[in-house]
Image (cartoon, rainbow, N blue to C red):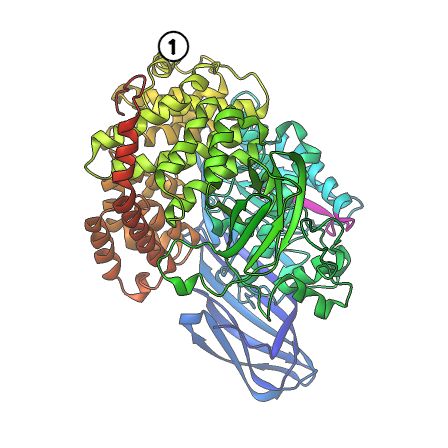
Amino acid sequence: MRLPKTISPIHYDLTIHPNLTTLDFTGVVRIQLDVHEDTNAIILHSKHLHISNVLLFATEGVKPLKVSEHPRFNQLALESDSVLAKGRRYEVQLEFAANFSESYHGFYKSSYRTSSGEVRVMASTQFEATFARLAFPCFDEPAFKANFTIRITREPRHIAISNMPMTTQHGVKISVYAVPEKIDQTAFALDAAVKLLDFYDDYFDIPYPLPKQDLAAIPDFQSGAMENWGLTTYRETGLLFDPDKSSASDKLGITKVIAHELAHQWFGNLVTMEWWNDLWLNEGFAKFMEFISLRITYPELQVSPLPWKNPTQIQEMFDDVSYDKGASLQLPKTVNSHLWESLTNVCNSDDLDEGRIKHKEFCSKRDVQSGATKWYSGDELDEGFPLVTVEVRGREVRLSQERYLKTDDYSLTEGFLWQIPLTYMTSTSSTVHRFLLKTKTDVLYLPEKADWVKFNVDMSGYYMVHYAGEGWNSIIKLLHHNHTALSSNDRASLIHNVFQLVSTEKVRLDTALDLSLYLSKETEIMAVTQGFGELVPLYKLMEKRDMAALENQMKDYIVDLFRGLIGRQEWTDSGSVSQRVLRSYLLLFGCFRNYAPCVSKATELFTKWKESDGTMSLPVDITMAVFLIGARTPEGWDFLLEKYRSSLQMSVKSRMKSAMSTSPLQEKLKWMMEHSLSNVVMKTQDLPDVMVSVSRNPRGYNMAWDFLRANWHILIKKFELGSSTVSFMVTGVTSQYSTREMLEEVRSFFGSLDEESGSEMRCIRQAYETIEDNIRWTDRNLPLLQAWLDKRRPRALHEDL
């Protein structure tokens, strides 16, 4: 399916005429080509385009080319009756025409409604990963970078923007585009883009190479954002900010999205991975730069990144990496070995290892070709996520490593070896110590005996830790008696690790629950949200089984843990960003779980807000909790829908939509999914979120599964077979099933599909695996959970949702 490397494009001259009345477009593209091997064919990509008048331009003159298609791989073969000679340069010209895409990919139609009710049409693009071929014939692979000259034919009343401005100028001009009714919500994004682009210019010491950078809020947009060079595009919720109606977490989220997309102007656009298997290089560095850039440009927004939800997210997280900027300028495309070579060249071995003889060889001073191998064994990097087991015996600490994986298949975890830079601290010293684990097992020696040892200080490394022997007991004792001896990041990582290790049978569930008891004293956002993140999924599994008594016991336990912290929250917008985000989280949970003081206050505020016809100003950070309670009655739900229809504030509409999807009113949940699909009132771009939210609602999960099956063929056409959105719907709707009956039902439906309707999609196998994991977990752990909860008496019982 990959294009041959016999020919590569140098320059595209593209003229395109979108017609917003007939909803189609025509165009002509002339591509300058370099020939690397003698060939009779030019093979490139085209999908759903009508191709005509294909011509080859050479020094000998102009001649037509024969066109043949390979629809399955979206390829065209332009065949010449004479050889295109190695080393020569040619040009090929193709005329093309198509309707605007009905999905959210390629060149597609979008629309919005003005304040007067007029519906206006616009056209937008989304090309990543394989959708430029829907807009014009091209070499649609990341390694085939080329220059472009673009002309867009339009009516005078329309606006057209592209990657470059019509005139060049000194300095970088930054603009934000939105529909007219929402342009007053763009000021924050413009200010953030200016700050962040200046920061990246200085930080990378590589000037932004284009004369302008536009940011555009697209009314219909499936992805969160897209890093098109010089013209980044966003969902409206990812760019528009109303200082009076948007929350602290909205501001943080918008700033991170802009920081991410602007980082891609260097990581992804200036330097591009050679093929999609190295996409993590683009995304990993852009994610890393979110946190670096915000720390400097918006320190008041700084909230530590939440712990990763599972080890596969390793590729999105980096610690203090020094990236070889000089090398990046020489790389039009890159592969992951270039990263290891750069790391090796800048690595410093000082203080890398303690507890044994220094490893002078760790950071190679040799040339690039051999240096990279210091970071991994053999020709390939061992992928996966390391689990380090630690057992303390006096001053001796025994270490071993293996691959972390939730599987019973020993062959999938055996044979992996990493060089893991460990960090640790002990009860006798707050100093961060280092040790390089480069073999399957090793031993380090402490200067003196310690009551406890904590590895992976502040979650600065990408490995999980299991404390064997009495290790977990000593950690639990520390957390119960003096939890602030460890940072909130360390406490969060312990919560994460212990519950994840229950899934691999390294740790018993009652040990993890014993550790969670300390959370009644916790106040920091990192640890609190990690606690919720591990405990809430347990009762979410039970909501989809017939076990209401145990489900309610679990819910009561969690409310009981956080009762004190919830009770100390004020229903205002005061405090730091961390305090405000935590407040929103806690009060929302209190309302979800019917904690009486929360329900009472939220009901009071919703009633007053409704009586004012929505004009009363609610504290922004608590609106979600208030809306959630309001959506529980038909009258309240209908009022929220009325305000949803008329609101222009995207963050407010998003909270209303989320609250409405948590309602216990089944006919309302069905209405939301149906109207999202038909793009009436609610946009189809929001359907995946609505459907997955309904699937997590104890009153709606069967409806979401039925809706997915009934509308499968419409959904895969609208959201594109194989897209991350289809994967999100498949895995999201099924991820909380844990019975053999539901596994059979899911297998029966997906097993009935053919290849054209998605039978080969990886997300289907992932859905099966997740349900199988859930079945194994519940079979093994529900009796333990029941016994552990029976041993403790909650202070009060709370009515179920």
Location of residue 290 by image quarter: top right
Residue at 23% in and 49% down:
710
Which corner quadrant holds the C terminus?
A: top left
In the image, the segment drawn in magenta is 204-216
Q: Is residue 568 above or below residue 308?
A: above
Assign a secondary structure to mark 1.
helix
Q: Position of residue 43 (x, y in %)?
A: 53, 76
Q: Horizontally, is 189 left or right of 615 in the view?
A: right
For badge 1, the amino acid type reads Lys
Does residue 208 show up magenta in the picture?
Answer: yes
Location of residue 193 by image quarter: top right
Front residue of 472/102: it is 472
Residue at 55% in and 71% down:
94
Q: Circle 1 sits on which residue?
A: 608
Does residue 552 show up magenta in the picture?
Answer: no
Q: Does residue 271 appear in this view?
A: yes
Q: Is residue 84 above or below residue 145?
A: below
Label 1 crowd (10 A; few <14 / some 14-19 / many >=20) = some
Q: Is residue 606 above or below residue 190?
A: above
Location of residue 240 by image quarter: top right
Q: Position of residue 23 (x, y in %)?
A: 44, 52
Q: Does residue 258 appear in this view?
A: no
